[in-house]
C-alpha cells in the first residue's frame, strides 16, 4: 500500500551510477599519461534529478537498478539520505553501474565510459507490478538509458492516467534509440543541439524542421538546450526562449539534469513556462559552479531567491 502524500511525488525512472570524474590538470594528450585529480560522486541522470528534487523539497520516488556491492549500498544510502524514496527500485547481483568521465582542463567532457549499466532490468513487467505507486505521481520522468519498450509502456500509462511523462535524452547514443519510437502524447522531451538531430529522420536538417518533425510525431513540448546560448521551449502554439547567464564553469557534469530539475520544480509550484525556464537556468548555473552533479548548497527557498541574481528584470 502506498500512502499518497499531501503533494504527489515526481517519479523518476532510469539510471543510478557511481560517477568517477578525472579532471585533467593540463591540456589532454592522446596515447600517453595525463595528470589528473579524481572525484567520486553519486550520479546517473534519474538519480541526480530525484536527489536534487528531494533537496528542493519535492516528494520523489526513484525506480532504478543498483548492484548488490558496496557501490550499490552507497548509492542507495546517498539517495535515501537526501530524501529519495526507493520503493520500486531493483537490486541485482553483481556490480553497480559506473560512469567514468574524463574532463578537460576547462571542465568540459573529453570522453566518458559507462560500465555495468543494467537499465534493461527496468521492464514493462516490473513497472506493471508497481502501477499503484505510479498512479500516485504528479509527473513521470524517464531518462533515455531505459529501453524503448519500457518508455513506450510509460507513455501508454501516461495517456491512460493523464499523468504527464517527460523523456530526458541523456546523450547521443541513448537518444538515437528513440528515432523511430512512438512519441504520440509525450508531454516533454529535453534534447540539446547534439541529441535533437538523432531523434529525427535524415530529412529534417535544420533545427526548425527537427522541432516540427517531433511536434508532428505527437510530442507536446520540445525543450531545446543550447549550452551557453540558453534554451527554447517549443509547442504547437508558441516558443519561449531564455538566454543563459554567463558564469565561470567548474564542472559541466549534471548541468542538464539540473535544468530539468529546476523546470519540474517550477511546474510543481504551478509556475508559468518562462518562470520554469528561469528556475531551470538558475539551478543549472549553480551546478556548473560546483564539483559533481548536485547543488547540495541549495534548498527551495535559496534557489527561488537566486533567480533574480541571474535574471534581474
Image (spheres, helix red, strand yellow):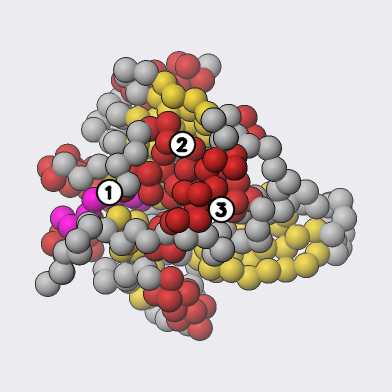
| Residue located beneath label 2 in the image | 277
Q: Residue at x 56, y 63 (%)?
A: 297
Alpha carbon distance from label 3 to label 1:
20 Å
Q: 308 above or below 85?
A: above
| Residue located beneath label 3 in the image | 254
Alpha carbon distance from label 2 to label 1:
17 Å
The first of marks 3 and 2 along the sequence is 3
Q: Is residue 298 magenta?
A: no
Q: Which residues are magenta?
A: 133-142
List x then y, in percent, for residue 3. 15, 69
Q: Is residue 134 magenta?
A: yes
Q: Residue at x 47, y 16 (%)?
A: 208
The first of marks 3 and 1 along the sequence is 1
List x then y, in percent, for residue 293. 57, 58
Classify the position of the C terminus by image quarter. Answer: top right
As drawn, the label of residue 139 is 1
Tell me if label 3 and label 1 are in contact, CB under 8 Å. no
Number of the front mark, 2 or 1: 2
As drawn, the label of residue 191 is none
Tell me: 292 left or right of 14: right
List x then y, in percent, for residue 109. 69, 49
**Residue nearer the viewer, 111 or 226:** 226
- Assign a secondary structure to mark 2: helix
- Assign a secondary structure to mark 1: strand
Quick check: can you spot residue 174?
A: no
Q: Residue at x 47, y 60 (%)?
A: 299
Amino acid at each position: 500500500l502506498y500512502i499518497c502524500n499531501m503533494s504527489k511525488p515526481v517519479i523518476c525512472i532510469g539510471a543510478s551510477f557511481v560517477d568517477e570524474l578525472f579532471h585533467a590538470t593540463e591540456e589532454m594528450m592522446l596515447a600517453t599519461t595525463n595528470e589528473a585529480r579524481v572525484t567520486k560522486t553519486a550520479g546517473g541522470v534519474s538519480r541526480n534529478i530525484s536527489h536534487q528534487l528531494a533537496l528542493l523539497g519535492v516528494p520523489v520516488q526513484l525506480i532504478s537498478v543498483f548492484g548488490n556491492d558496496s557501490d550499490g549500498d552507497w548509492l542507495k544510502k546517498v539517495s535515501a539520505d537526501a530524501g529519495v524514496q526507493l520503493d520500486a527500485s531493483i537490486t541485482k547481483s553483481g556490480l553497480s553501474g559506473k560512469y567514468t568521465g574524463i574532463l578537460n582542463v576547462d571542465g568540459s567532457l573529453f570522453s566518458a565510459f559507462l560500465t555495468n549499466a543494467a537499465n534493461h532490468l527496468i521492464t514493462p513487467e516490473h513497472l506493471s507490478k508497481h502501477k499503484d505507486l505510479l498512479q500516485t505521481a504528479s509527473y513521470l520522468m524517464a531518462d533515455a538509458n531505459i529501453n524503448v519498450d519500457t518508455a513506450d509502456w510509460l507513455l501508454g500509462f501516461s495517456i491512460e492516467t493523464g499523468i504527464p511523462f517527460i523523456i530526458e535524452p541523456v546523450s547521443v547514443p541513448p537518444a538515437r534509440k528513440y528515432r523511430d519510437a512512438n512519441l504520440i502524447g509525450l508531454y516533454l522531451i529535453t534534447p540539446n543541439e547534439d541529441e535533437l538531430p538523432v531523434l529525427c529522420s535524415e530529412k529534417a536538417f535544420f533545427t526548425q524542421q527537427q522541432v516540427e518533425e517531433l511536434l508532428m510525431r505527437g510530442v507536446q513540448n520540445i525543450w531545446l538546450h543550447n549550452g551557453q546560448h540558453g534554451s527554447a521551449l517549443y509547442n504547437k502554439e508558441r516558443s519561449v526562449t531564455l538566454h543563459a547567464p554567463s558564469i565561470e564553469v567548474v564542472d559541466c557534469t549534471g548541468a542538464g539534469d539540473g535544468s530539468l530539475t529546476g523546470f519540474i520544480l517550477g511546474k510543481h509550484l504551478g509556475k508559468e513556462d518562462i518562470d520554469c525556464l528561469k528556475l531551470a537556468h538558475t539551478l543549472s548555473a549553480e551546478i556548473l559552479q560546483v564539483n559533481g552533479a548536485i547543488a547540495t548548497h541549495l534548498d527551495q527557498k535559496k534557489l527561488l531567491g537566486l533567480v533574480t541574481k541571474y535574471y534581474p528584470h
